[in-house]
Image (cartoon, rainbow, N blue to C red):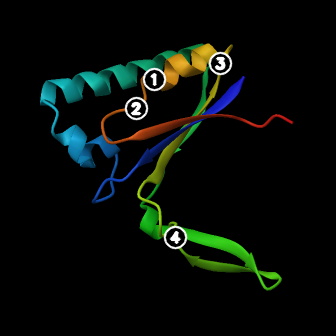
Amino acid sequence: MKYVILIHSNPQPWGHPTGDYIAEQQALPQAEREKGMAEFDQILEQMSKSGELQGGTALGDPASARLYRWEGGKPISTDGPYAEAKEHLAGFFLIDVASPERAEEIVATFSGPGETVELRPVWEG
């Protein structure tokens, strides 16, 4: 079963790892932040070894995004991201796991203070 883990964040200024730029995470004691990063690195290593991690990457500053919409019979591009968005897509991971429960177990380790993490099945129509 394939899933994508979408990391939504709103750090100002933009940077990676996003936790270094989010006020809620900056407010945590340094030892707690380091522990969280170590646990995150450990789950990534485990998923790499097991073959569950299929790929993923951090994304660039949303201010550099371009949006394309269909208007008047042709594509029109505008500066992104969506103006009304408070959070932006910061990165993603593609996983291939044995069950929805395993996907939920993994994604629970990806969320931190000030971030929203989305788990979405990959369409395999």
Count neighbours of disc 2 (C-alpha within 10 A) and say few if under 14, some if 14 to 19, many if 20 or more: some
Residue 116 sits above or below residue 65 on the image: above
Q: Tell me if label 4 and label 3 are in contact, CB under 8 Å.
A: no
Residue behind mark 3 = 100
Lower position in the chain sequence, tag 4 or tag 3: 4
Disc number at residue 108?
A: 1
Q: Position of residue 77 (x, y in %)?
A: 63, 78
Residue 47 makes an appearance in the image: no
- The Cα atoms of the two marked residues, 1 and 3, are separated by 12 Å
Q: Position of residue 56 (x, y in %)?
A: 55, 39
Type of the residue with mark 4:
Gly
Type of the residue with mark 1:
Ala
Type of the residue with mark 3:
Pro
Lower position in the chain sequence, tag 4 or tag 2: 4
Secondary structure category for the residue under label 2? loop
Residue behind mark 4 = 80
Disc number at residue 111?
A: 2
Q: Position of residue 55 (x, y in %)?
A: 59, 35
Lower position in the chain sequence, tag 1 or tag 3: 3
Secondary structure category for the residue under label 1? loop
Quarter of the N terminus within the rendering: top right
Secondary structure category for the residue under label 4? loop
- The Cα atoms of the two marked residues, 3 and 2, are separated by 17 Å
Q: Tell me if label 1 and label 2 are in contact, CB under 8 Å.
A: yes
Q: Position of residue 60 (x, y in %)?
A: 45, 57
Q: Which residue does the image show at 15% across and 24% down from the upper left?
A: 31
